[in-house]
Image: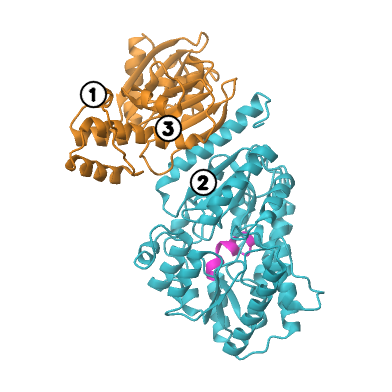
Chain colours: A cyan, B orange
Amino acid sequence: MSKCSGDKQVKAKNCDPCSPPSVDCCSSAVTTEQNDSPTLWFENMIDNCYDYAIDAKSNSRPIVGIMCEYAPRELIMAAGGVPVCLCGGSAKTIPAAEDYLPANLCPLIKSTFGYHITKTNPFLEMADLVVAETTCDGKKKMFELMAETKAVHLMELPQKQDDSEAFEHWVTEIHKLKAELETRFDVQITPEKIREASRIMNRERNLRRGLAGLMKADAPPLTGRQLLNFKSIISGIPTDLEKYEEAAEILRSHSRNGDMSSRVRVLLTGVPVVHGAERVVDIIEESGGLIVCMENCTGLKPILEDVDLNAADPIRALAKKYFHIHCAVMTRNTRRIDYLRALTAEYRAECVIDLVWQACVTYDIESYQVRRLAEQELHVPYLRIETDYSPSDSARIAVRVEALFETLRSSYRTGQPCRK
Amino acid sequence: MIAVGVDAGSRAIKIVLMDSDTRSILATGLVKQGVNSDELTSHLLDCLLNECALNRDDIGYVVATGYARNRISIADTTITEITCHACGVHHVVPDARTVVEIGGQDSKFLHLDPTGAVHDFAMNDRCAAGTGRFLEVVSERLGVGLEDLGQMSARSSNPAVISSMCIVFAETEIIGLLSAGAAPEDIVAGVQNAIVTRVASMAGRSITPPVVFTGGVALVPGMSQALERLIGQSVTVAPNPQMTGALGAAILASKQA
């Protein structure tokens, strides 16, 4: 829905032909841009990452693909590798994937695999290794097929978050990944290298938390969609870190944007909104909403906690940080409910919108608990949107989102609590 | 001044003209939806104004709703069908607490608070199985008019079980039932049950009475009875059910005029 993205020339031509990085020409929030502005820098994120990866590759640094926030990026970085996120956000690669995978499968998995089949994701093509996890059954079985033609290392992710034996198993899995990286790339991953990588990643997470925190204001200086653009599929790029810092400085000095304070404050939870699949975000913000908090894997979820740099064993410190990620595959996933409760208050969200990709069983089922939390405990309206990457239901989604906002506004007008 | 409500739906465009001060309905009109909803709307509006010896200068405010609401150039603003149907039904049945609306391609379940404001709602997603379009496909397949469906289903002694949630598959299922010798009456009754089951599943477990049935499908004989049987509560068909969306839009317009 970014109206002018069609004119954008993408250097990494093969990367995502149907969803080039968006150019937010229609935004009212961030207006003054110089050529080196952070906004423009992240608009060229795919190109920047492409240049960075090509450069790294020519310096014999391995490119390591990841497809899940549970992949410990620090370990890849400590091995001298470049961790790059391969999650597919394009509907165009799905038909090719469906020659191998069932139609009734999450679009993110199909899109990613479709890029593999059509060889159209340059990052996947140049990856020396893909680090996979048993996050969900769909990914797990897809990785089996990917492993037929690509080097894949599978980590078994335990799913009982509060079980000490499950945690010990996860520590073992991280040790196995370390051994795989060391053997494959002929390097030694020292504790100091892990600490250094953790320091970089902590800084990146801290800077991104700072940007996200700007949305707590009554009239935030940017939209949720603009915030979503401040990300990179490769972690730890030094220029990215500088630009995050610069963006926060510029945005903090922005004057209050009155338009923002009249919008409905939305907490978006559920599945990740990966690059190219931002349709629902656009619908929400074009219907008068402002996504003040994105509690998902492309928002706050993976950056809420840092790695303890002072821990005696940096591997265990890494394991702890990653094992705490509150994905719906965890059982019981009480951390998600606790975070949703805290974030709704912190960001003063007026409603909760829960996005579920079609056939994502764990998020689909967990939406029951999220609805119950929103309606019965937090007393904010809840809307669940189940969709995939095809735009055919955009009009219907817009009706439901607009009706949600109308309901909220009318309850304000009459001074009644929206839901009791 | 007059207030105008336009409901540009998937199968028909409906317009209500209302006196902004007295809230009395001056005229209502309906035209079949076509390629250019904006032109069709303008034409229908001019016909209605003409009937009432009014012209466009008399219009204070226009609210458009329905799936084509964003294409209506005369509209001052747009409001969703959910809010408009709630408002329209509350106007004609003030104590309504639950509204079931089935239109050409949408079906909705609205839960109203005692003041008529929308408390909660559910709506179909991509699939049009629980909608008027489903009935049209069936009546075409069986070669009977929509208006005859009620009489047919009333004669059914053993409603067929239509398990498919998808119109396309349901049509295949109907062909299978016909070739297996099922009576058309039983198929029609089965389809009507399938539609209300689909819609009622959106409501969850609690349905607060009184229940009002609206939208074009409420006009199809047999549908309200099928809904009553399924939810085990009496169902009131809204007066002029095709018009409640446009009526709600007109009322909301009159608040602006």
Judge whether B52 appears above or below A157 on screen. Answer: above
Q: Is residue B91 magenta?
A: no
Which mark, residue B148?
Answer: 1
Marks 1 and 2, Cα distance to the nearest angstrom?
37 Å
Q: Characterize the local packing of mark 1: few (<14), some (14-19) or many (20 or more) Cα atoms within 10 angstroms.
A: few
> Does any portion of residue A205 appear in the rendered image?
yes
Viewer-closest of B156 and A272: B156
- Residue drawn at 69 percent across, 47 percent down: A220
- The amino acid at mark 3 is Arg
Does dot 2 land on a helix, a strand or a loop?
Answer: strand
Element on which disc 3 rests: helix
Query: Hey, what amino acid is under mark 1?
Result: Asp
Regarding mark 1 in the picture, which secondary structure is present there? Answer: helix
Residue beneath the point at 65% across and 23% down: A414
Q: For mark 2, what is the residue?
A: A385
User: Which of these two is toward me, A320 or A307?
Assistant: A320
Residue B69, labelled with which disc? 3
Q: Are marks 1 and 2 on the same chain?
A: no
Image location (x, y in percent) of residue B5: 44, 22
Q: Which residues are magenta?
A: A36-47
Q: Main secondary structure of the magenta part?
A: helix
